[in-house]
Amino acid sequence: MFTKEKRLKVQMTIMLAIVGIGIGWLFAVQFKTTPSRVLNPVTPYLSLTQAQATLTRDQDETKNTIKALKKEIDESQAQIKIQQKSAKTMVEELEQLKDKVGLTEKKGKGVVVTLADSSKEIPNIDSIVHAADLRDLVNVLWGADAQAISVNDERLTNTSSIDSIINTILVDNTKITNPFVIRVEGDQKKIQKVLEDANALSDIKKRVKSEGLVFNTEKLDVTVNEFGASFSVNFAKTK
């Protein structure tokens, strides 16, 4: 049997062995981890450097992409401006053409001329208005740089006709009747001066004095309708 002293020695030996093993393990762990502690400051630096390089590359690519997109946008805007300018020019030209052929309503300063048959109870060839009188009047007005003319709200154009069939006066195949109201858009002073000229429309003015033919002029703001000539079918009657 072990004496008390021997048991104490055995216990002390075991305890020292355990302590020794523990100390050895600590040293071993410390030895293994020491190199990692030395490398730790370098690893984050390398990672940051790589991240910075990647970020710089991505930024450059993004800048290049944005630059390319901006170029495309600028080119597209330039094309749009060219197309808009072209479209605007075409619209303006179209409006000018429409205006020339009388397809737009005209408003502005002008003169209203009233030409009407005499009030004589027994009319004669000189006391009534003829198609030729209206043609003469319109020609004088065009000569005074009239911008737009209508006769009884029928717009006249460069190709309009004023004719008569027996006692009926036609403007572009549209029947018009006495009195004849001619609206003229243009320079009021110039138009009025021409109309008051003794050498202009001398036959009409002569008949005004001799037969009572009505010929009045007035400076007014006028509206000349757009061209809308009717055809003879408008006046056909069904049986």
Image (cartoon, rainbow, N blue to C red):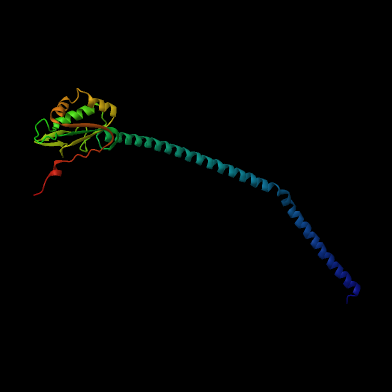
**Is 222 in front, or is 236?**
222
Q: Which residue, as the protein is rendered here, is positioned at the far bottom? A: 1
Q: Is residue 210 above or below residue 35?
A: above
Q: Where residue 155 appears, x then y in whole percent?
A: 22, 36
Which residue is at a point 76% across and 57% down the rendered structure image? Answer: 28
Rendered-image quadrant of the N terminus: bottom right
**Is 12 in front, or is 90?**
90
- With 203 as the anchor, is 8 left or right in this view? right
**Is 118 in front, or is 40?**
118
State the count of labels: 0
Q: Where residue 173 appears, x then y in whole percent?
A: 15, 38
Residue 71 at least partly seen: yes
**Is 75 in front, or is 3?**
75
Residue 187 at least partly seen: no
Q: Is residue 125 above or below residue 55?
A: above
Q: On the image, which quarter does residue 55 sit in? A: top right
Q: Is residue 32 above or below residue 213?
A: below
Which residue is at a point 19% across and 29% down the rendered structure image? Answer: 137
